[in-house]
Amino acid sequence: MIKVILVGDIGSGKTHTSKLFRVPYFSADAEVKKIYRGNRKCFNILKKQFPKFIKTFPIQKSQLSKIIKNKISNLRKIGFIVHPFVRKKMETFLIKNKKKKFVVLDIPLYLENKMNKKDDIIIFLKTKKKVVYKRLKKRKNFNKKILNILRKSQLSLAEKKSKSNYVLLNNYNSVIMKNKVKILKNKIINDRSSS
């Protein structure tokens, strides 16, 4: 199985690009949303850790934002609680798809959490900072302070790029990106079979 991981800036289009590979893909963000909506065990741990903020189930995004804004180090604490639940979901996904030729993982903190394995194919999604910021501002729950806190918790873009096997420029044009992904996918398969 070829395991591909997309890395890049927040809002660089990792989720959309993951889908363009047309292979089974795992989205950590989607799983986190499900965990906040339906996992009582996670809720109870978070409520115990942050009783002033977590009051009702399911967990609201606004409650989490308040926790992070209150103290930057709380982001790490939330991560320590939620990460094992996400990792378990990812392991289930990989077992389910172990016979597939190709899978894509969209996990924002993949490198930061040292989840990468020797055979992983890491693709850095390159974007223009201005375009990313413009897109992020359009998001319903956009908060500049939270965005900066999240960025500080990640490796720099230069570090992510240096740890990547391939670089893919995202110009946010679906037709062009579809073609770029198809070419890159074939290149990865050829490179893997010739090595």
Image: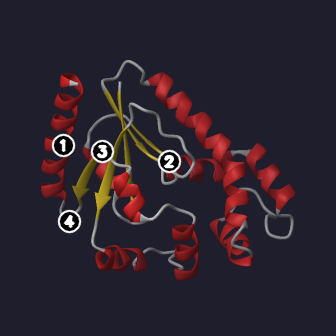
Residue position for label 2: 110
The amino acid on which the numbered mark 4 sits, given as a three-letter code, is Asn
Residue position for label 4: 171
As helix, strand or loop, the secondary structure at mark 1 comes to: helix
Q: Nearer the N terminus, badge 4 or badge 3?
A: 3
Image quarter of residue 189:
top left
- 17 vs 57, left or right, is left
Q: CA distance from mark 2 to mark 1?
A: 21 Å
Image quarter of residue 156:
bottom left
Q: Nearer the N terminus, badge 3 or badge 2?
A: 2
Residue position for label 1: 184
Between marks 4 and 2 in the image, the one whose residue lies nearer the viewer = 2
Q: CA distance from mark 1 to mark 4?
A: 15 Å
- 62 vs 165, left or right, is right
User: Observer-nearest residue: 158 or 178?
Assistant: 158
Picture disc at residue 165:
3
Between marks 3 and 2 in the image, the one whose residue lies nearer the viewer = 3
As helix, strand or loop, the secondary structure at mark 4 comes to: loop
Residue 148 appearing in the image: yes
Q: CA distance from mark 3 to mark 2?
A: 15 Å
